[in-house]
Each structure stands twice: as C-alpha cells, then as structure tokens.
Amino acid sequence: MTFTNYSNFDSTLKLTKAVPITVAAFKRLDANDQLGLLWEIYQRMEQEGWIAVATLGTARLKLAQGLLHQIKLMSFSEQLQAMRDLLNKINTPITRAYGLFRNNKLVFWHQLATLIGSGEVVPVPADYKLSPAATEVFNQVMLLDFGRKVQFLRRVVADLGVDPMAI
C-alpha cells in the first residue's frame, strides 16, 4: 500500500501563496499605512544589512536620480503628497515619470528611504508607530524568507505610480 505525504505539498503551496497574500494585505492598507510600512521594512532591511543585496542588479540608478531630485526640491508637505500619489496611482507628472521606470522601482524606494532617513525628504515623526493593520502586514513580511521579502517589495513597488503609456 502506498501512502502520500501531503504536508510538504501543503507547506510549498502556502509558501507560493505567501507573497501574493501579503501583497494583497498591503494593498488593503491606506496610503499612510503603506508609507509607514515601507519605511519600517526598509529600516529593518538596513539594520539587517540585506537592502544592498536586494537592490543589487537593479538597472541604472541615474534614471531614478532625476525624479528623486525633483522630490527633494519640494516642500515636505508636497513630498508627502507625491508619495501618497504614487501609492494611490494619482495621475501627476511625478507618478507618470515613476511609471516609466521598469527595473528601477525598488532602488528608487531604497534611495527615497535613505533620503527620508537623512532628513532630505519629509522625515517620519520620531514617535511614529504602525497601525495594528500595518503591524500585521509587517509581521507577515518578516516571516518571509529573504527571496520572498524581495519578491514582495518588487511586486508592491512595481504596481505603484501611473503608466503613462496606458493613459
């Protein structure tokens, strides 16, 4: 008699669905929670030293630098609105420029997080805490292995902004 062990299959299936489920949970958050969550994830990545590895191999940073420079020239309130517009896919010159990036979106957000950390872009308040819903998604992300964390981030940032070719 042959017995089949389904536990490995179930585990593999759960792992395959982990990223899409976590991305869907991220998308259900409002823009402020999404920004806070991205900030917390990038902070953790910096602390653990894996952000550089995650952004290696991304295409030319110079393409993103022009857009980052435009954002740096804005007031803090305009910067925050530009980030919200990216998350909410509001049609603006900034979101359309971002939409032109193909392989630079992950490195764009990494550089943006670096600028936030340095105070060149609107800083996160010192007493900021994730909402309970955002904390739940953060915990889901932290349970992912390294490759799936990167996959999660790529899927999230790839879907932001406005594709000017689709307008």
Image (cartoon, grey):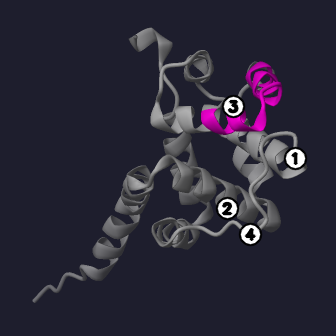
The answer to whether the residue labelled 3 contacts the one labelled 4, judged by CB atoms less than 8 Å apart, is no
Q: Where is residue 131 in the image (x, y as percent from the top left)?
A: 53, 68
Say which residue label 2 marks.
40
Say which residue label 3 marks.
78
Q: What residue type is labelled 1?
A: Gly
| Alpha-carbon span between mark 2 and mark 4 | 13 Å
Q: In this view, does 21 lie above or below 88?
A: below
Q: Where is residue 156 in the image (x, y as percent from the top left)?
A: 50, 44
Q: Where is residue 164 in the image (x, y as percent from the top left)?
A: 49, 12
Q: What element carries label 4?
A: loop
Say which residue label 1 marks.
119
Decide if residue 162 is in sight here.
yes
Write the start and end of the magenta stretch as one range. 65-81
| Alpha-carbon span between mark 1 and mark 4 | 15 Å
Q: Would you call the spot at circle 2 few (<14 residues within 10 Å), some (14-19), or many (20 or more)?
A: some
In the rendered image, the quadrant that contains the N terminus is bottom left
The answer to whether the residue labelled 1 contacts the one labelled 4, judged by CB atoms less than 8 Å apart, is no
| Alpha-carbon span between mark 3 and mark 2 | 21 Å
How many numbered discs sit on the rendered protein? 4
Q: Would you call the spot at circle 3 few (<14 residues within 10 Å), some (14-19), or many (20 or more)?
A: some
Q: In this view, does 152 lie to the left or right of 57?
A: left
Q: Which amino acid does label 2 sit on?
A: Glu
Decide if residue 56 is in sight here.
no
Q: What element carries label 1?
A: loop
Q: What residue type is labelled 4?
A: Asp
Decide which of 9, 157 is in the foreground and name it: 157
Residue depth check, mark 2 versus mark 4: number of the one nearer the observer: 4
